[in-house]
Amino acid sequence: MSCTTLRKAQRPSLPNNGLYALLFICLGVLAQGQETLYMPLEFKKAYENGSRSLNGLPGKNYWQNHSVYDIEVEIVPGTWKILGTQHISYTNHSPDSLDQVVIRMYPNHYKKGGLRANEMPLSNLTEGMQITDLTVNGEPVALEKSTFTSELAHADQTKKEADKISVSRKATYLVLELSDPLPPKSVNTFTMAWSTEMPLEYVNKIGAYDAESAFVGYWYPQIAVYDDIDGWDKTEYTGAQECYTDFADFNVKVKVPKGNYVLATGHLQNPEAVFSEKELERYQALTQSGQTITVLDAKKRAKETTSSEIWHYSANNVRDFGLGVSNNFTWLGKPTLVGDRTVASNILFSERDQENLRDLMNVQNHGIQFLSNKLPGVAFPYDSFTTFVGVPEFDGMEFPMMANNGFSKNEIRNNLMTFHEVAHTYLPHWVGVNEIKYSWMEEGWVTFLSIKYCQDLYRGTEHENFELERSIRSYNRSAGTQWGPPLFTPSNYMVIRSMHFQQSYRKPAFMYLALEDLLGEEVFKKCLQAYLERWKEKHPTPYDFMFTFNDVSGQNLNWFWNKWVFGHGHADVGIAQLEGDQLELENLGGFPVPVSLKVTYKDGNHLILKKTAGLWSKGNDKVQITIPNAADVSSVGLITDAFPDVVRGNNELQLPQ
């Protein structure tokens, strides 16, 4: 890091002898051999414009756009057709005049002939999303006059029509070309009607559980993110990655046949209209009782087909809106206290899964408490969380205040899946990272937290390190291959499943574990809490995360980031030799990793030596460690049960007896 960069990052105060203080800082930098981080031009521009700061805080000119969605929608169980109208109030907080607007159409992922990276049952193929009656600030959009249709990466756009607003159609979004741009700081209105349908078979995290129940996600036309790094997000949704969405306010009215019930992101505004008297009493007890409550028993709920009812939900400043619909699931609720407020915790499940449910409600609430009080030790951001358990495979997907999960026959995996999705509340839903480009900034964190949660939940039992051991095995299977590019590589290029799991889940989780070991638990936790607080309800990039840890820890960790985030490599340390009392270790994988050694003596005693990743802070690939009483040593071995090591053949040194 240059002296200029350091001054901006740490903002030292300069008294009368400020020149000497600055000189001291610069000499310190040179003495420590501090490094700089590679930064692409689009990121440099954001720092130059003041929307980001080199100390990891949002810049003085930070901005992000915001929408208010008013949606009225009818959902038809069985066919799972969705008919909607919506009004969007869109505020352009950016300093730019927007001559384009991008509208996402996620259901086109299921369109016949659509663009996708995953297998799709033929029964799930649809006509996609149809938008009609689209207006922008009252100006009708001639959707039938689309000027351009192509899924080819290098196709040229044809000339615009003479209309004030022309349309370019991509696979999963529309681009509106505006002759009258949206001015900075302006509030703009979009209205439209639309229709689509959910997959008839669950696939890719949404769709029908059966003819009576479904989880509805990625379902409404959504204005894409326009940010200070990339401008408009024009990434196609292929199913290989998740989503990047702005924070928005939602006011949603869901019409379903009477006898169905709807749980959704946000707060139910009309419980008196949709519950019977006894159901309402149980629903209201969710915030009052410490016991598990059966809010709805699907076997006893009347079902009608001749009339409908409307479930009205609202949510403010959330990244998305998801909902589940059923008339044959059981709804259990058990509130949990977080500080001085109550979080309404809910689980909905099919009767077929009841025998596997076991203690999942208590596990979910234990997870909320763990996240709030232990790690990250930040109060759960929302006052409700609901898990739908109906997915016909072991899978899970997070939405704001909700999750859509499946069961395996393994109780531990079920418990950890439930926690995993609850933990996503913090990242990416409260701290709105770009999941499309940087899935490691949310999946990696949640994998790290799941390892810690498993150790807490099963402490003192044989399952304490279940998640850690599983993650080590998964990491070792593919680390060091060509499918492991630097973490900074945009995640949406990772369409190979094993590559995605390594890059998004395993590798970053072990980076965070190495970082925690390096900084110590207390400093690490302080940095993590600062990162969450600084970037809650905002859009951080990898640099905002790294600069925050540099700033709050008071350390320049760029040597660590350069290897783990920007470099090629893997976790692999070998024992080279023991000469005298100096044990030589070789970093064969290149990543700065912690090292644990078991030194066994001829008398049968042994010594455990532990070193943090700081062992490699000078960029060295070999180090010497002093071994006490080296003449009496019979063997030295690397301990690999707490951190991965890809090649095991060089982990043991046997000495002559």
Image (tube, helix red, strand yellow):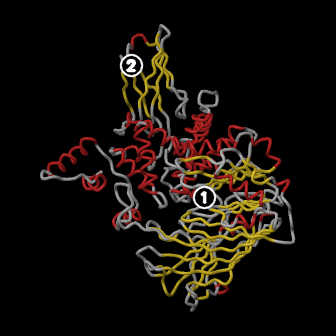
Assign a secondary structure to mark 1.
Answer: loop
Marks 2 and 1, Cα distance to the nearest angstrom?
Answer: 52 Å
Specify few, some or many for label 1: CA neighbours under 10 Å numbering under 14, 14-19, or 20 or more.
Answer: many
Nearer to us in this view, 631 or 335: 335
**As displayed, is residue 430 above or below residue 133?**
above
Nearer to us in this view, 331 or 66: 331
Q: Amino acid at mark 1?
A: Pro
**As displayed, is residue 282 above or below residue 190?**
above
Nearer to us in this view, 125 or 353: 353
| Circle nearer the N terminus (2, 1) | 1
Q: Position of residue 558 (x, y in %)?
A: 36, 47
Residue 11 lies left or right of residue 407; in this view the side is left
Residue at 73 percent of width and 38 percent of height: 410
Specify few, some or many for label 2: CA neighbours under 10 Å numbering under 14, 14-19, or 20 or more.
Answer: some
Q: Name the quadrant containing residue 621.
A: top left
Assign a secondary structure to mark 2.
Answer: loop
Q: Is residue 590 visible?
A: no
Q: Position of residue 153 (x, y in %)?
A: 58, 70
Q: Name the quadrant containing residue 535.
A: bottom left
Residue at 81 percent of width and 68 percent of height: 257
The residue labelled by disc 1 is 400
Residue 392 lies left or right of residue 627; in this view the side is right
Q: Is residue 623 visible?
A: yes
Q: Position of residue 64 (x, y in %)?
A: 46, 68
Q: Position of residue 512 (x, y in %)?
A: 48, 42
Q: Which of the labelled discs sits on residue 627, or is there none?
A: 2
